Amino acid sequence: MGKKILAVLCLLPVFLFCCCTTRETDNMETKNIGTVTFINSVSDADVWILADTEANRKTTLWGTATLSKIPKGESREAQLCEPGDEGLYMFRMIDTDKYYYSADHIAIEDGCTVEIKGEELNQITIEVTYGSGAVVSTYEVFAARL
């Protein structure tokens, strides 16, 4: 009987440890602070616009996509979370052909337009424009097949 109790006492912490679930993405889900217009000119994809933080850059668990299944050539309004370090955002996209797109240190604000564009994988960019329509910033995007 003593061995059974000892076995139960040893297995209980293991069971509790394995059954407890924490989500790394919980830290990325914060209150919305505005919206941007996102234009997808590359490929049908899921898009994440996240706070640019060290923790977010080190994970591949981004949570629910900011824009899910956005077709090429379409624009949608996207909710902005609070920005990360230095008021910046990071961009992640996975398209239907399993290509991965990534850019960090992007300065965007409520009301701007963010467009991903380019035909060749080594020439994909993100352009940020504000009310006037003039391109304020252009960011290179890393792109590769998963």
Image (cartoon, rainbow, N blue to C red):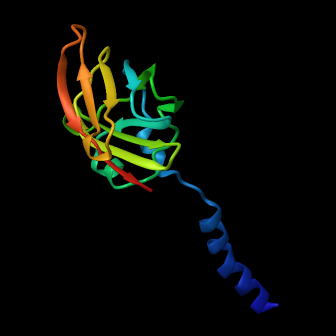
9 over 71 or under it: above or below: below
Q: Position of residue 137 (x, y in %)?
A: 18, 27
Furthest residue in direction front, as rendered:
119
Residue depicted at 48% across the width and 42% down the height: 95
* Quarter of the figure that contains the C terminus: bottom left
How many marks can you see? 0
Furthest residue in direction top, as rendered:
132
Residue depicted at 78% across the width and 87% down the height: 4
Residue depicted at 47% across the width and 51% down the height: 61
Residue 134 shown left or right of residue 80 in the figure = left
Relative depth, front residue between 91 and 7: 91
Residue 130 shown left or right of residue 34 in the figure = left
Q: Quadrant of residue 19?
A: bottom right
Q: Quadrant of residue 30?
A: top left
Relative depth, front residue between 14 and 143: 143
Q: Position of residue 136 (x, y in %)?
A: 17, 21
Residue 46 shown left or right of residue 57 in the figure = right
Q: Quadrant of residue 33?
A: top left
Relative depth, front residue between 76 and 123: 123
Residue depicted at 67% across the width and 70% down the height: 15
* Quarter of the figure that contains the N terminus: bottom right
